[in-house]
């Protein structure tokens, strides 16, 4: 009888642990307007998604006086463990597998954040004048959950492979009319 109680308790614990998923599914409808351009400083703000559909923050891109600045920001209980970032004139030049999946460990800019952060900026000398493509990836974790690293991407166009990774087609602010990107 005691063994049966122990096995029943172990089975119950197993079911409770594995039925509570790390990925909290939410009914989130994706908008088609992916960019909110701040007219004051010309910053383009893209949504940052974890687990493909959970809106957890933003990726903000500015280009001023020969400098590109990319800022990752999370909201709520989400924290950034790592960032991987790549910029090119042609999206095909962003490191990808033969199948078209992004290769984040081949991205030019990579940072580990210990302790974890909710905001991180990277500044680059702007050899990129005019339009360019950016892949902005982060490994994020929700505080007070059993989750480990969850993929997060700045919202844009999907890579052609099977992963849900995305790249951003950035149009610099020209001082007149911001370009709202609809993908």
Image: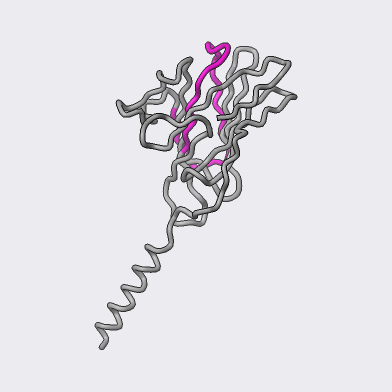
Residue 107, image x, y percentages: 41, 25
Q: State the image quarter where residue 38 is shown.
A: top right
User: In this view of the protein, which residue sits in the foreground, 117 or 97?
Assistant: 97
Is 144 left, or right, of 159 in this rendering?
Answer: right
Residue 125, image x, y percentages: 54, 15
User: In this view of the protein, which residue sits in the foreground, 78 or 165?
Assistant: 165
Q: Which residues are magenta?
A: 110-138
User: In this view of the protein, which residue sits in the foreground, 150 or 114?
Assistant: 150
Residue 181, image x, y percentages: 60, 27
Main secondary structure of the magenta stretch: strand
Q: Quadrant of the N terminus?
A: bottom left
115 within the magenta span: yes
Residue at the extreme bottom: 1
72, above or below 91, in the image? below
Q: State the image quarter where residue 47 is shown.
A: top right
* Residue located at (46% from left, 24% from top): 86
* Residue located at (54% from left, 19% from top): 124
172, above or below 84, in the image? above
87 within the magenta span: no
């Amino acid at each position: 009888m005691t063994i049966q109680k122990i096995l029943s308790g172990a089975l119950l614990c197993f079911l409770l642990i594995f039925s509570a998923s790390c990925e909290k599914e939410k009914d989130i409808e994706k908008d088609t307007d992916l960019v909110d351009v701040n007219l004051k400083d010309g910053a383009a703000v893209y949504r940052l998604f974890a687990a493909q559909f959970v809106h957890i923050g933003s990726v903000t891109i500015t280009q001023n006086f020969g400098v590109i600045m990319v800022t990752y920001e999370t909201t709520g209980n989400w924290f950034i463990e790592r960032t991987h970032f790549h910029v090119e004139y042609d999206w095909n030049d962003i490191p990808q597998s033969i199948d078209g999946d992004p290769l984040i460990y081949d991205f030019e800019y990579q940072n580990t954040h210990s302790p974890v952060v909710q905001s991180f900026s990277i500044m680059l000398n702007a050899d990129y004048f005019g339009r360019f493509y950016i892949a902005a990836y982060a490994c994020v974790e929700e505080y007070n959950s059993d989750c480990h690293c969850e993929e997060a991407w700045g919202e844009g166009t999907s890579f052609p492979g099977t992963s849900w990774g995305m790249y951003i087609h950035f149009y610099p602010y020209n001082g007149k009319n911001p370009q709202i990107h609809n993908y």
